[in-house]
Image (cartoon, grey):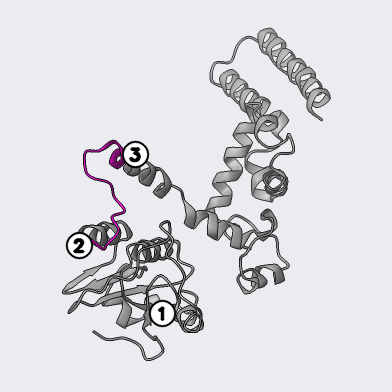
Amino acid sequence: MATPNNLTPTNCSWWPISALESDAAKPAEAPDAHEAASPAHWPGESLVLYHWTQSFSSQKVRLVIAEKGLVCEERDVSLPQSEHKEPWFMRLNLGEEVPVIIHRDNIISDYDQIIDYVERTFTGEHVVALMPEVGSPQHARVLQYRELLDALPMDAYTHGCILHPELTTDSMIPKYATAEIRRQKCELWLCGCAFTLADVLLGATLHRLKFLGLSKKYWEDGSRPNLQSFFERVQRRFAFRKVLGDIHTTLLSAVIPNAFRLVKRKPPSFFGASFLMGSLGGMGYFAYWYLKKKYI
């Protein structure tokens, strides 16, 4: 198995190495029943975990290993430095994702499968069982909470807060993660400085919600100022004004051209055409001023 020279294996026990060294001179304390189990040694077996410290999935796997009191080697894979895209790591996981665990001849790269494997493989009198007995009410509740919590889109939350630090309060995100974005002077759209298909789709969606009268319910009540700002900016774009026009005249822009097309296809008498055109013009005029007075 090929590993890079700059990755140093560390002892993955309940306490970090630094803590173990600093606690060596302290008197022994009585164990707490609520603390994690003591490290359980498995002679002749090697457990290796490739992870990144800030990876949410890696953190959960490391917590499971620590709570069960297992000893393993941790090898840090820096995602900011794209080490997960290097050939040596891709030989372990073509998906280029952490965590990856190696035990015996098994290489497991799926987060859920890693937890299930560790829970199923490492059992015994001195090993903590994190899953209750199958068939018990507690087992069903654990599965329910696991499904509920694993469904949370934490990657989307994390990346969204990095891209939009102005939305956070007392964030612990390192400054280097947001410094580049803060230095940018251009307008930020959904995916960065460039206006993309994502902005087109959101702009069209907000336009339709505004047309249906739902804008005050979802963003114009002041609850979503960033969404309000986005819609105001997207409405000023040339393509948006060309295609969708003024929000208050959307209905007229759909009715009047169809009326003219109908008259052209089936031309009535001169008197009838004059009356129809005058009626449409009058209704359009009064509808415009009514909508302008009501919404503007």
Q: Where is residue 146 in the image (x, y as percent from the top left)?
A: 36, 46
- Residue at 37 percent of width and 62 percent of height: 67
Q: Position of residue 176 (x, y in %)?
A: 63, 74
Residue 130 lies within the magenta run: yes
Q: What residue type is labelled 1?
A: Glu
Judging depth in this view, the residue of 25 and 81 nearest the camera is 25
Question: What amino acid is found at the position of numbered circle 3 in the picture?
Answer: Arg
Q: Quadrant of residue 36?
A: bottom left
Q: From what the image shows, is residue 181 above or below residue 137?
A: below
Which amino acid is tagged 2? Thr
- Residue 214 location in percent, x, y? 64, 29
Compared with residue 156, is residue 15 higher up or lower down, i.e. above or below? Answer: below
For the point 70% across and 8% down, the residue is: 271
The foreground one among 273 and 278 is 278
In the rendered image, which residue does mark 2 sit on? Answer: 121
Query: What residue is shown with label 1?
Result: 83
- Segment colored magenta: 123-141
SS for callout 3: helix
Comparing labels 1 and 2, the label whose residue is closer to the camera = 2
Where on the picture, by quarter, is residue 7? bottom left
Q: Residues within 10 Å of mark 2 (few under 14, many from 20)?
A: few
